[in-house]
Amino acid sequence: MFKNINPTQTKAWKKLEIHFSKTKSVHLKQLFQENKNRKAEFSLSLEQLQFDFSKNRITDKTLELLVELAHETGLKEAIDSLFQGEKINTTENRAVLHTALREFKDNKLKIEGASVYQEINNARQKIKSFTEKVISGKWKGATGKPITDIVNIGIGGSDLGPKMVVEALDFYSNHLRTHFISNIDGDATHQILKRINPETTLFIVVSKTFSTIETLTNAKTCKNWLLNKLSEEAIEKHFVAVSTNTDAVKNFGINPTNTFPMWNWVGGRFSMWSSVGISIALAIGYDNFEKFLKGANAADTHFKQTAFDKNIPVIMALLSVWYTNFFGITGEAILPYAESLNKLVAYLQQLFMESNGKSVDRNGEKIAYQTGNIIFGSTGSNAQHSFMQHIHQGTQLIPVDFIGFKKSLFGDQKHHDILMANYKAQSEALQQGKTKEAVYLDMKFNGNTNQINKLIPYKVFEGNRVSNIFLFDNLTPFNLGLLIALYEHKVFVQGVLWNINSFDQFGVELGKEMAANS
Ligand code: F6P
C-alpha cells in the first residue's frame, strides 16, 4: 500500500533543497561543456523510443537525490500496489487497473471473485467479433445497408482518448468515417447529423456511469433523429453502448447484447484501452488496436521492472517534481511534431490535470506544497508561430516535451526534413540561447548597424530552458500506445510523490450540481 508521506518532511527533500540552492544557477551550456558524454549518459531507450533528458538542469547528484526521494516516499511499494490491484483509489474504495487492460497473460487478479483477465479477455473477443462484422459489412443497418459512419457519443475520458487516437492513427484507418459528439452544444451535434445517413450510421454511446448529462442529451437527440427516419426496431442495428450501468443502458433502449463492459476499477481518463476504445478498433481494425495495447504493455513492463534511475516514466515524473517544487514552475508544454497528434495535448490535459489537480493529501490534510501543473501545447511547428515566444524569452521556466518521428508515414522526405530540423533546433535554442556577442556579430554581419546597441537586449536569449526529447522511428499503433502509457505512469509517480490520490475527481462535481440546479 501507499506510505502517505509528506514529501517535504523526508530526508531526501531536505538534501534536494540544499542541492538546489547550490546548483540553481548553473547553465546547461556549462553542464554540456563539462561532460562531453552528457547526451549519451542522460539518454535511455525503450523498444523504438529514444528518450533524451540531457537538456535538463540536473547532474548525477540531482538524479541520485530524486531517486532517493522516490524510495523514501515508497514508490516501489506503490507500483506493486497498482499492478496487484489493491484499492489504491481510497476515496472511492476502488482498484486502479488500466494496466490490466493491456496485459496478454493471466495476472491471476480477482475483483469481487471474478477473474480480471477473464473479463478483459471476454470483452476483447466481443470487440473483435463486433468490429470485424462492422468493418467487413456483415453487420447491416436496419434497411440492409452496410455501415459507413461511426458516431462516438461521450465526453471527457469517454471521448478524448478515442478521438485523439482515431485521428493520430488515421494513416492506418479503413473505409469507415468516425465522428465524435461530446459537447452539449446542440449546434455541434446537428452539424454532424447533417453529414450522415441514418441507414448507414452506427452510434456508440460511451459513458461509464451512463448518467452524464451531456452524453445522455446527445444520445437522445441522435436517437430521435434516427427514429424520425427509421422504426423503433432499427435501434438494435444502429446503437451500441459502453458502460458499467447496464440497467440505464437498457432503459435507454439499447439491447444488452449490444452493450460492451466497463468496470469501476478503470478510471474514465484511463479507459480507452477497454471497450471505450471500440471506435479505435473500428477505425483501424482490431489487430491494430491490439498492437496499440501491446505498446502500452511494453511501457508497463518497463515501468514495473526497471530501476528508477533508468526508468523513463519515473524520470519524467522526478524531473517534473524537481521543477515544480524547487524551481517553482507552474506549466509544462507538450509539443508533438506530427500534425496527426493534434489532439494529444487535450487528452493529456485531462490525464494530468484531472488526476493531479489536488490540494488535499492522502491523509486528508491540506497541502502546503505545489501539486500538478498547467499542461498545454500544440503541434510543432505550429506552436513555434504562436506561444513559443513565451517559452524562449518569457520570465517563467516551462519544461517542454518534444515528440518526434524519424520517418514520415507518407514518405515525403522534403517536408519531413524541414519538420525535423525544427524539432531539433527548438530544443537546442532553448538550451543554448544566444549571447549578446553573438547577437552583435549577427547584426553587424547583416548590416543592421544603425540601432545595434538599442536592439541587443531584445534579441538576446538566456537559454538554460529545459526539455525532454522523445524520438520514435515512426508513428505506429504500438509506439503511440507506449508513449501514452509512459505519460500515465508519470502521472502516477507524481501522485505518489506528492502524496495525493490521482484517481478521484471530486473537483468536477460542484459545477455540475450548480448547473443541474439552475
Ligand atoms: O465529469 C468528469 C468525468 O467524470 C470524467 O472523469 C469522465 O471521464 C467524464 O466525466 C465522463 O464520464 P462518463 O463516462 O461516466 O460519462
Image (cartoon, helix red, strand yellow):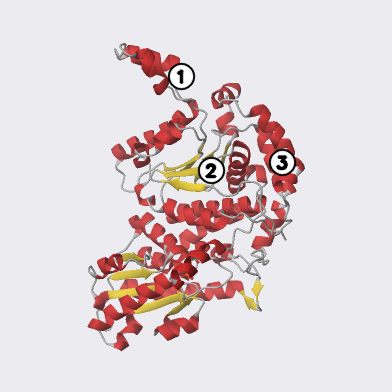
Tag 3, which secondary structure?
A: helix
x, y percent for residue 497: 66, 50
Lateral position of residue 465 relative to residue 204, left or right: right
Q: Is the residue 424 above or below the residue 345 in the image?
A: above
Residue 103 visible in image: no
Mark 3–mark 2 distance (CA, rounded to whole Å): 19 Å
Q: Is the residue 79 above or below the residue 16 in the image?
A: below
Mark 3–mark 1 distance (CA, rounded to whole Å): 34 Å
Question: Image quadrant for the N terminus?
Answer: bottom right
Residue receiving disc 3:
13
Lateral position of residue 184 relative to residue 121, left or right: left
Say which of marks 3 and 2 sits in front. 2
Residue receiving disc 1:
435
Alpha-carbon neighbours of circle 3 within 10 Å: few (<14), some, or many (≥20)?
Answer: many
Mark 2 residue type:
Thr
Mark 1–mark 2 distance (CA, rounded to whole Å): 27 Å
Alpha-carbon neighbours of circle 1 within 10 Å: few (<14), some, or many (≥20)?
Answer: some
x, y percent for residue 254: 40, 83
Mark 3 or mark 1: which comes first in sequence?
Answer: 3
Tag 2, which secondary structure?
A: loop
Mark 3 or mark 2: which comes first in sequence?
Answer: 3
Mark 1 residue type:
Thr
Question: Image quadrant for the C terminus?
Answer: bottom left
Lateral position of residue 85 relative to residue 54, left or right: right
Tag 1, which secondary structure?
A: loop
Q: From this viewpoint, which residue is outermost toward the front?
A: 518
What's the mark number on residue 330? 2
Q: Nearer the viewer, residue 357 or 483?
A: 357
